[in-house]
Amino acid sequence: MRPAVQDERPNRRDTRQTGVVLRRVLWAARAMPVLGAIGERFGETRPLEGLRIAACLHVTAETAVLMGALKAGGARIALAASNPLSTQDDVAEALQGQGIDVYARAGVDRATYYRHIHQALDIGPDIVLDDGCDLVNILHTERTDLLPGVSGGCEETTTGIIRLRQMAAEDALRFPVVAVNDTRTKRMFDNRYGTGQSTMDGIMRATNVMLAGRTVVVAGFGFCGRGVAERAKGLGARVVVTEIDPVKALDATLQGYEVRPMAEAAVIGDLFITVTGNRDVITGEHLALMRDGAILANAGHFDVEINVRALEEIAVELHPGVRPNTDEYVLADGRRLLLLAEGRLVNLTAAEGHPAAVMDMSFSAQALAVVWLAQERASLAPGVYDVPEYIDVEVARLKLAATGIAIDTLTDEQEEYLHSWRVGS
């Protein structure tokens, strides 16, 4: 079966364009020295020899570097997109030219999006890589015939981990999955700093709005929400946080943010950014309270955090594309609400997602977790597993080394002290 990048349009590759995209992938690779070193190691040791991997990820230049590392390790790969609006078509074609089956195209409808996932699964995977749990969900609902052959998977998003833990709690998960999202390096480097920067980048590109002096409402104060709040505050905005978790709400308060229910925040906000991993964070009730010109952006994985259907129902006019990735909804009383990126991931739809240096950390942990799965799969029962601590430490150590940063090491006396309970003050 021919991949979707070929079966829906002629594959007429312009060599000039191919050169441009390859240079862009190389540009990303230069900012990903850790994954580059891992890829070189994989090429020598071939730890994935003969394994079939089905992946559902954002098809970007950074993902191309990960695919190259896994292929160097001996894997055969089929890749589908985890979000149709984040797919970079030229990267998809470049990967296809490197022997990786790619089923992805920018802007496809929902039916085509799911068909692409099915096409990736046709490889009959041994291991799966997921970004939001859609591929794993399809395996457990529509492609159960493939489950006996799947020995494990990796998940890289908060949204996906939430779904997987619920599957495990209901005894529905049929193979082990590694929670790559939950490593210390991922939460710190990717979720906090990556999401914070790339979300503001997407909003700026879509609106060119000045944030200094404006009120930004951040829904959710997890690692991603914390990063978004920090970046907005750094740009001079007044930041209001909404939360359902009392501990996170207290944390936000102690960091100097206002904490309010969404019903109160809706009245005062100029820009709303959802980062929760849950649905209906902004509902029709909240939309009815918002100011003229309020901007709505989502940085959570799925397009369910802002109730776009409710927005469509209360609008009397729609002006699509008033700016790139910005649609204007006019309400009956003349107020205008601006929705960015159709309510999808604003950082990947209106911008380019995380910087390559960020994805270097996340994808390095992903690559090493795949090898760990391949080695340990026979002994792992179905469930959600943390990435082994040594992988997290190795990724951090390699990143420090690549940036020329040295740290102290424990002396023998310090090691002994830390492992003894007999020494007092």
Image (cartoon, rainbow, N blue to C red):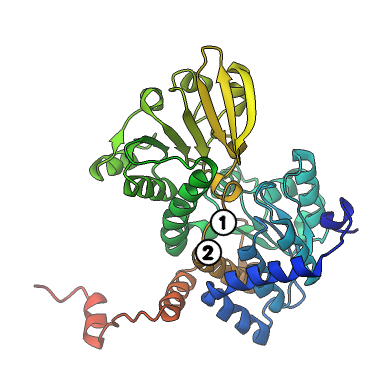
Where does residue 96 sit, x and y in percent of width and height? 79, 66
Can the viewer see residue 52 in this picture?
Answer: no
Residue 221's place in the image compared with 392, above or below, is: above
Where does residue 259 sit, x and y in percent of width and height? 31, 34
The kind of residue tagged 2 is Ser
Q: Which residue lies furthest to the left in this view?
A: 425
Residue 230's place in the image compared with 70, above or below, is: above
Mark 1: which secondary structure? loop
Which tag, 1 or 2, sits closer to the chain's start? 1
The kind of residue tagged 1 is Glu
Mark 2: which secondary structure? helix
The residue tagged 2 is 362
**Residue nearest the viewer, comparing 337 with 142:** 337
Can the viewer see residue 333 in this picture?
Answer: yes
Task: Identify the residue shown where x is 61% and y is 65%.
Answer: 62
The residue tagged 1 is 156
Question: Would you identify the image quadrant in which residue 375 lies?
Answer: bottom right
Location of the N terminus by quadrant is: bottom right
Residue 281's place in the image compared with 173, above or below, is: above
**Within 10 Å of the Cα at label 2, are there few (<14), some (14-19), or many (20+) other Cα atoms?**
many
Location of the C terminus by quadrant is: bottom left
**Within 10 Å of the Cα at label 1, are there few (<14), some (14-19), or many (20+) other Cα atoms?**
many
